[in-house]
Image (cartoon, rainbow, N blue to C red):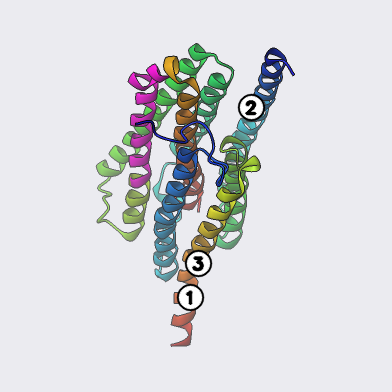
Amino acid sequence: MQIPYTVTPRSDTGLFNGKLGIWLFLASEVMLFGALFSSYVLLRTGAPTWPRGWEELNIPLATLNTAILITSSVTMVMSWASLMMKDFNKFRRYMGSTILLAFGFLVVKAFEYGHKFELGHFPSTSNFFAVYFTMTGLHGLHVIGGIVVNSYLLGPGSKMWNTEPERFTNRVEIAGLYWHFVDLVWIFLFPSLYLL
Amino acid sequence: MSDSSQSAEHDIDIKKHVRIYIIVFVTLLALTLITVAVSYLHLSIVPAVTVALVIATVKASLVACYFMHLISEKKLIYISLSFTAVFFIALMFLPLWHMSDNLTH
């Protein structure tokens, strides 16, 4: 059976189904991270003392990671734009770069975590580190999820380009929306945890 | 209009998008450097939070509007996101509610 509205928009929503689906999923993600941000504000404002981010965390490494994630957002949107221009080879290059940059982000994060563990800083150390590890850990899991989806689209999933190019382009657009959301969360995590 | 001229127009449109992506990319990097530079001034918490959140909101808006194409989306998505925004703002106000509760008791 053919799945309806994977390419053509529904007349009532004006959208293909996947697009509405990903936006509703992202809305639920906003609430998930929102709950964590809200808890962070509650814990911080209720605490008698709270360290400033720069006293405990490594700002240059986090700045590097911010640049990596922003760059990966650009390569992601360029991979979609390449498909819109019917250039599959360019798509492969940009999507490959996005995945590599995502791995780069995780490697930097692993160094950061490793250093914290060496110093004896664990989630149980203080509320500050509990918040830091919970929020960056959940974000890191989202990065891993993005790598899995993007790798599928670059690998076995890319066969769809030969049979249903428009549907494949829509899939890449949807994966892109998710990836930009992961970038967007980091845009708020970075100053909230490291710079304040 | 012929198929070839439509396709050429479509290509020009996408190329325009690509130019915008590059401009947004450079702006995002510049704003990141600015927010990091300001953090080295070690401002007191209120101005530090204000500057950091204003810059983060500008950056997030650029990502949402241009990379996520929210600047030209369908009405249903705006409606769904406006509900999300209301609940998100309510969530952010919960700690304030708690703080005012502490002050009155």
Count the labels in the image.
3
Residues at discs 2 and 1 in contact (Cβ within 8 Å)? no
Query: Hey, what amino acid is under mark 3?
Result: Ala
Helix, strand or loop at label 1? It is helix
Q: Is mark 2 on a helix, strand or loop?
A: helix
Q: Quadrant of the C terminus of chain B?
A: bottom left
Is the residue at mark 2 from the same chain as the one at mark 1?
Answer: yes
Foreground mark, 3 or 2, reads: 3
Q: Position of residue B34 (x, y in %)?
A: 62, 41
Residue at 42% across, 64% down: A44
Q: Of the residues shown, which amino acid type is indicated by label 1? A: Trp
Question: Disc 2: which chain?
Answer: B
Give the extent of the magenta segment: A138-160
Does residue A87 show up?
yes
Q: Mark 2 points at which residue?
A: B22
Q: Nearer the viewer, residue A18 or A70?
A: A18
State whether residue B90 is above or below residue B38: below
Q: Between disc 1 and disc 3, whose residue precedes?
A: 3
Tell me the crowding category of disc 2: few under 14, some 14 to 19, or many 20 or more residues within 10 angstroms, Cα based. Answer: few
Query: Is residue A155 one of those drawn in magenta?
Result: yes
Q: Where is residue A50 in the image (x, y as percent from the top left)?
A: 41, 62
